[in-house]
Image (spheres, helix red, strand yellow):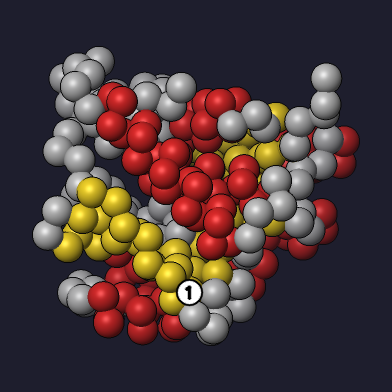
Amino acid sequence: MKEPIKLLTIGGSDSGGAAGIQADLKTWTVLGGYGMSVVTAVTAQNSLTVQDVAWMTPRFVQSQLETVLSDYGATAVKTGFLGRTELIIAVSAMLQKYHPAHVVIDPVLVNHRGQPMFSDEVRILYFYYLLPLATLVTPNVTEAAVLLNTSTLDSLGVIRRAAQSLHRWGVQNVLIKGWREQQEVVDVLFDGESFTEFRQPLIETQNTHGSGDVLSAAICAFLAQGLGAETAVAQAQQYTHQAIQRAAEWELGGGHGPLALF
Ligand code: PXL
């Protein structure tokens, strides 16, 4: 059997299995990659709530990274739930030491109500420590506004300008996700030269827990397969859309349920 492409996620564990590293690993298995995970935090979480969080120490995160990357290595790396300045600095140092071919930064900064979860220092460290190393950064509309410390992004024109602002920090591609326009969801990609819009029909369901993680994990896998950013985003968006569609009627828990990844 052909060897799989090696993919590493650096993020939090969701005990409910919908988001975080579980979403990434499941997505990668379906898409034919070999998934590895460095855990930054463990959440006690279900479809209704994040009940509790236990953080790993920066030293232990660094130890996981060194141990995995010095042996297996990884063609592509994705970061998710980082949330602590010392963790961001440790992850940045390891990315610079091992420089994987593709780095996808999913800036997990707000809770599901759109409120910032972390200190302003965390936000600022994304610019100095992570964006310059990234192939792609994937904020949703709310996260992009939080990152840039601006008010709500309220039109596609403002979203395009936000993408340009983020691009100036050295990241190769910016994808701002989740603009709602009538019955469509629009994601905007900026590669430093041109904008591409990706549109999907809005699906009426509360089962979207982890959809951002699945999308960025799928993009990461497709980039590692050698696809360009535009094709990788298009294919990942299609995969995520279909996964939401397949699970739209599920009632696995009492709240926001997962996607059907398989
Ligand atoms: O969907 C973002 C996310 C990332 N990582 C972890 C999470 C969540 C959201 O629930 O729990 C661990």
Quarter of the image with the N terminus is: top right
- Local crowd at mark 1 within 10 Å, few (<14), some, or many (≥20)? many
At label 1, the amino acid type is Phe
Regarding residue 87, the answer to whether it shows in the image is no
The part of the image, by quadrant, that contains residue 207 is top left
Q: Nearer the viewer, residue 191 or 217?
A: 191
SS of the residue under disc 1: strand
**Which sits in the foreground, 91 or 242?**
242
Disc 1 target residue: 190
Q: Quadrant of residue 56?
A: top right
Say left or right for 99 vs 10. Answer: right
Q: Position of residue 155 (x, y in %)?
A: 20, 76
Is residue 218 among the parts visible in the rendering?
yes
Residue 114 appears at what percent x and percent y? Answer: 23, 55
x, y (%) of residue 73?
A: 82, 42
Find residue 220 and report its horizontal and vertical position in percent.
Answer: 59, 48
When asked about the image quadrant of residue 173, the answer is bottom right
Residue at position x 20%, y 47% from top? 202
Residue most extreme to the top: 252
Placement of 182 over or under 196, stated as above or below: above
- At x 48%, y 46%, the residue is 236
The correct choice, above or below, for 210 with respect to 251 in the image is below
